Amino acid sequence: MPLNSVFARRLYLCWLISQHERPNVPRLMALTGWPRRTMQDVLKALPGMGIELQFIQQGVRNNDGYYQLADWGPLDSQWIARHHDQLLAAIE
């Protein structure tokens, strides 16, 4: 059964955040090729799935900083790590 692309995008973004040091919106956009609005929408949706996402402020501007996963919530991070290629395929 194919994965839902919206759900796959959210899982894939969680995996990316966990794999990269200090991922911010511009860096995540560069890694995924997704537009800013898509990235912001996906980030905004993660807490609704039970995922605890933190923005670590650095600098004086509101958007100076990076994202960090504090809790995967109901998600199995090991499953996501093993299947991130399938998630990416479901998105494309």
Image (cartoon, rainbow, N blue to C red):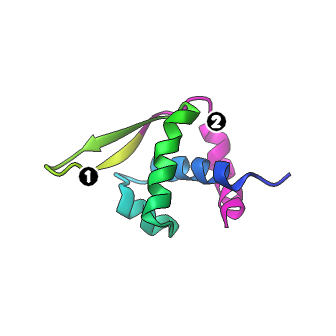
Outermost residue on the left side: it is 60
Q: Amino acid at mark 1?
A: Asn
Q: Residue at x 51, y 66 (%)?
A: 34
The x, y position of residue 50, in whole percent, is 55, 30
* Above/below status of 77 relative to 61: above
Outermost residue on the right side: it is 1
Q: Residue at x 47, y 47 (%)?
A: 43
The residue lying toward the viewer, choosing from 17 and 3, is 3
- Magenta-colored stretch includes residue 80: yes
The residue lying toward the viewer, choosing from 36 and 3, is 36
Q: Tell me, yes or no, if residue 19 can be seen here.
A: no
Q: Residue at x 66, y 61 (%)?
A: 91
Q: Residue at x 52, y 40 (%)?
A: 46
Residue at mark 1: 63
Q: Tell me, yes or no, if residue 14 can be seen here.
A: yes
Q: Which residues are magenta?
A: 69-92
Q: Amino acid at mark 2?
A: Asp
Number of numbered labels in the structure image: 2
Mark 1 / mark 2, whichever is N-terminal: 1
Dot 2 falls on a residue whose secondary structure is loop
Q: Is residue 72 left or right of residue 86?
A: left
- Magenta-colored stretch includes residue 70: yes
Residue at mark 2: 76
Q: Residue 87 falls in which quadrant of the image? A: bottom right
Q: Tell me the number on the disc at residue 91.
A: none
